[in-house]
Image (spheres, rainbow, N blue to C red):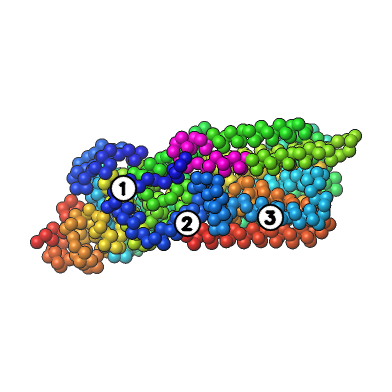
Amino acid sequence: MVANSTGDGAAPAAAGAAPFVPGTTPTDGPLLQLRDISKSFGPVQALTGIDLDIPVGEVTALVGDNGAGKSTLVKCIAGIYQPNGGQLVWNGNPVQLHSPKDAADLGIATVYQDLALCDNLDIVQNMLLGHEVTRLGLLNEISMELTAKQTLRDLSVTTVRSIRQPVGSLSGGQRQAVAVAKAVMLDAQLVMLDEPTAALGVSQTELVLGLITRLARRGHAVIVISHNLTDVFRVADRLAVLYLGRLVATGPAAEFDPQSVVDYMTTGTSGRLGNGSLSQPTASSGFGTGSEG
Amino acid sequence: MATTDHDVPAEESPSSPVAVAGAGESAAEADEAAHLARGTTSPELLANSLGEYFRLWLRRARSGESGALPVIVGLIVLGAYFQIREPAFLSATNIANLMAQAGWIITIAMAQVFVLLLGEIDLSVAFNAAIGGTITIWMVSVHHPFPTWLAIIVGLAVSGAIASIEGLLIVWLKIPSFIVTLAGLLGLNGVLIWLFDEAGQVGNGGVISSHNNFINDLAGGNLSPVAGWVILIVALLLGGCYLIWRDQRRRTNNLAAPPLGVTLLKLGLMAVVGAVLVAVLNVNRGSAFTPLEGVPWVVLIVLVLLGGSTLLLTRTRFGRYLYAIGGSAEAARRAGINLSRIRVLAFLLAGLFAGVTGILYTSLLGSMSNDFEGGQYVLYSVAGAVIGGVSLFGGRGRMLGAVLGGFVVAVIYNGVDLLGLGAAGQYIWTALVLLAAVTLDALARRGARST
Ligand SMILES: Nc1ncnc2c1ncn2[C@@H]1O[C@H](COP(=O)(O)OP(=O)(O)O)[C@@H](O)[C@H]1O
Ligand SMILES: [Mg+2]
């Protein structure tokens, strides 16, 4: 279980500190590398030549206007779509994801806003759905409940009254927390969240943002899609800005400011940074260079 | 245990986002969340004492998640009404009759539960029962002296196979179960008539009588009075020990468990109801020379089926997946569950329970005929399940509910018959009770959604 990850809470957030990732030998390179990924739907070119590195222990925020291709990119990584061109590299090895199951087997979990939980089942039942523990063919409720409880505790999800309450009775933020905990419990090394806070109120958003931060601290690689730049700057270690299917800027979040991100999102360039003509940023070198000046 | 063990202790430092969220949450929002949590979680796991248990239970009942309460209240109201109108209603003879009549109505309601939990329906379940029953009784009729056990197995297998084929059609062709099983209802009615008309003149004027003692005894025979007591006591002891052992294991693992008082109270209630029932059914309802006494076999059969199917639904992967698919098929699919396999298995189980129904029906009537009212009986199955709190929309309901709901239908059937109200009264009563049950279901759904 990921829950046993050593260095929990102690792993520094700084890039390059490469926290321990359960189930893998820590390597220096990024967990996932996207190399020249393209995806078209008939005549619609949804993604063009995406190069992006996803490091462990960091939150990478994927931002962009509606239709920029954020969801399509996430679905390519989740095995739902197969890219038309390019290569996914996982822990240094090229991989082909033919189905969501391939992605799940690698350790990639996607948390959608909804659709991932059964309202009529309780938290434990939802978290272990499809991975039930049985003994002599009968469900081992005690073992499952202890596992779920431990995972929630590791993630500091403290706002649920009883983990035997149906998920339908939870607030939006709590549901999101259960969905994330479920992903973590299944040994996900990369957790992707598509618009995790879109439907949430202020306090619930806080809950989910805190959870996202802790996921990264625990040594998971995290990709977050969000429209909300305030949220993005709260949690992201790195930003990747998509514009009309192209990656127009990428780099440490500290090198961006909200206005430059808006510029990239809406025009694909940022005059403020003075290098707006670039359209093929490399994944490793930050694109926001120069913002310090 | 002194505290609610389920609560994940707050270990986060006050500056952490979650702690901030907790503190920042408006009091009203927090209150509401707590209320909702208490409103829907089973009170056993939140209560620390018997008193608190009742308070939580009442609150939950008011929020629409009332469990078996409405059906038990309904039973008491109906029983009181029939008893006032006809004092013979609660006589030992009539209660034994009622049990025998209730058997097949309960099992047909149980059959429907497997598919209702998925949000599907099996409209052909009654005619499927008739086919299974016909095959069994035909195999043990005078002309075909097959062993009884073989006849029963073949009857069950045929019903199971028919329902499985319907399930496969639903899964492969993605046709709604409503349509496939509606075709099944018509088609199997045809097959039943054809079996009687053509296939080797099985019946005599559209009726095959059963001369097989074992089959006739299923609904008509009784346990000896001593056996009734022994089975009751053994079942209560085993069940009680299991419940207490299970709760104790939860406590030693630091998990919330129902207060001992609640468990003991439930066991006590079961013991009282069971003892009254056994005592009444052990009264000699025959004559001094030809005594007729004891608990009908069919009661034991239904209880065994109830125990087995409850185990299947609540303690196995298959059961868990039934509820999951009924709650959200998409979530179940994403969890890696093979939806098609579970759906076909659910139809298979519905078919097997239909087969049991057919045999119990044959046993009760001592015969099977080609004017079997399968269109009416399928409504009993849906009514029984829904009256017992099984949702038509999938994902909610218990097998015990269907047993109680089926029993309500049987009580109406029996009581209306005693009052001499005939088919008209029987239909109207069943319809009214069904409407009341569906209204409760809709209210519960609204309550659950408004969170
Ligand atoms: N399944 C699909 N079929 C055809 N076009 C699609 C499909 N999915 C996405 N697109 C197109 O690809 C582009 C990117 O969409 P999407 O990834 O959903 O954007 P975002 O999530 O950034 O809002 C849009 O132009 C959209 O219309
Ligand atoms: Mg999108």
Which residue occupies 82% across, 54% down? B86
Is B216 rendered above or below residue A268?
Answer: above
Which residue is denoted by mark 1 in the rendering?
A: B12
Label 1 residue SS = loop
Q: CA distance from mark 2 to mark 1?
A: 24 Å
Does B203 sit left or right of A288 as displayed?
right
For mark 3, what is the residue? B74
Ligand 2 neighbours mark 3 (CB distance < 8 Å):
no
Q: Nearer the viewer, residue B325 or B436?
A: B436
Mark 1 or mark 3: name the one nearer the start of the chain.
1
Q: Residues within 10 Å of mark 1 (few under 14, many from 20)?
A: some
Q: Residue at x 57, y 43 (%)?
A: B262
Q: Quadrant of residue A198?
A: bottom left
Q: Please provide percent x and percent y for residue A187.
A: 35, 42
Judged by depth in the image, the label closer to the viewer, 3 or 2, is 2
Measured as percent of width and height from the top left, residue B250 is found at 48, 37
**What amino acid is found at the position of numbered circle 2 in the picture?**
His
Q: Is residue B247 magenta?
A: yes
Give the number of the disc on residue B228: none
Amino acid at the residue labelled 1: Glu
Q: Range of the magenta residues?
A: B246-267
Residue carrying label 2: B35
Give, as a three-letter code, the residue at label 3: Gly
- Quadrant of the rendered image containing residue A46: bottom left
